[in-house]
Image: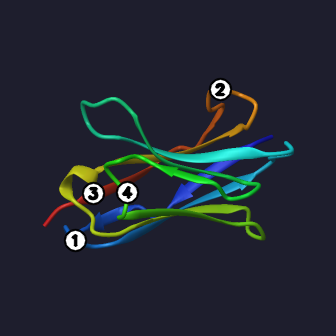
């Protein structure tokens, strides 16, 4: 059974940093992708970043390029999202999601963690 559990959210001032963690378990596929998404109040969920488990290939939304970094720890089976230079518009519930590389849509989702950027 695939599980993803996010942690690390909280309240931070503009310009500050947070690191989100996504602990994964149960992935038995040859290769898979883990992504971070976010949803702000009244807005649709949007893509933030993703990483492939084999090879560590990454992609970012334009809005976070140069500020956010996605990475993985093969030993801990954990994916991280380092968020720097945070802005109020980064405020959202952040979700991690996973899927086998062969599938077009993300199949597995975590419960989400709240990130609030405010002074």
Local secondary structure at mark 4: loop
Q: Which marked residue is nearer to the observer: mark 1 or mark 3?
A: 1
Residue tagged by mark 4?
65
Residue under label 3: 116
In front of the other: label 1 or label 2?
Answer: 2
Judge from the rendering whether residue 40 lies leftward or rightward of residue 13; answer left or right: right
Which numbered disc flags the more N-terminal residue, 4 or 1? Answer: 1
| Badge 4 density bin: few <14, some 14–19, many ≥20, Cα 10 Å | few
Q: Nearer the viewer, residue 100 or 24?
A: 100
Dot 1 or dot 3: first in sequence order is 1
Q: Nearer the viewer, mark 4 or mark 3?
A: 4
> Compared with residue 23, is residue 32 higher up or lower down, i.e. above or below?
above
Sequence-first disc among 4 and 3: 4
Q: Earlier in the sequence, mark 3 or mark 2?
A: 2
Foreground pick, 58 / 113? 58
Marker disc for residue 104:
2
Query: Which residue occupies 34% across, 72% down?
Result: 17
Residue at position x 27%, y 57% from top?
Answer: 116
State the CA–CA distance, disc 3 to disc 2.
30 Å
Per the image, label 1 sits on a secondary structure element best described as loop
Q: CA distance from mark 4 to mark 1?
A: 15 Å
> Picture coordinates of residue 48 (x, y %)?
43, 47
Residue identified by numbered label 1:
15
Q: Looking at the figure, which quarter contains the N terminus? A: top right
Q: Earlier in the sequence, mark 2 or mark 4?
A: 4
C-alpha distance separating marks 1 and 2: 35 Å
Asked if labels 1 and 4 touch by Cβ distance under 8 angstroms, the answer is no
Under tag 3, what secondary structure?
Answer: strand
User: Which type of secondary structure does the marked residue at label 2 adopt?
Assistant: loop
């Amino acid at each position: 059974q695939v599980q993803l559990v996010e942690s690390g959210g909280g309240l931070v001032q503009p310009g500050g940093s947070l690191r989100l963690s996504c602990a994964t378990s149960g992935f038995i596929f040859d290769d898979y992708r883990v992504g971070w998404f976010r949803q702000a109040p009244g807005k649709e969920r949007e893509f933030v970043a993703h990483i492939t488990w084999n090879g560590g290939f990454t992609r970012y939304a334009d809005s976070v390029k140069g500020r956010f970094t996605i990475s993985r720890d093969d030993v801990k089976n954990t994916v991280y999202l380092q968020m720097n230079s945070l802005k109020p518009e980064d405020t959202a519930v952040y979700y991690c999601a996973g899927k086998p590389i062969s599938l077009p849509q993300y199949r597995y989702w975590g419960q989400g963690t709240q990130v609030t950027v405010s002074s």
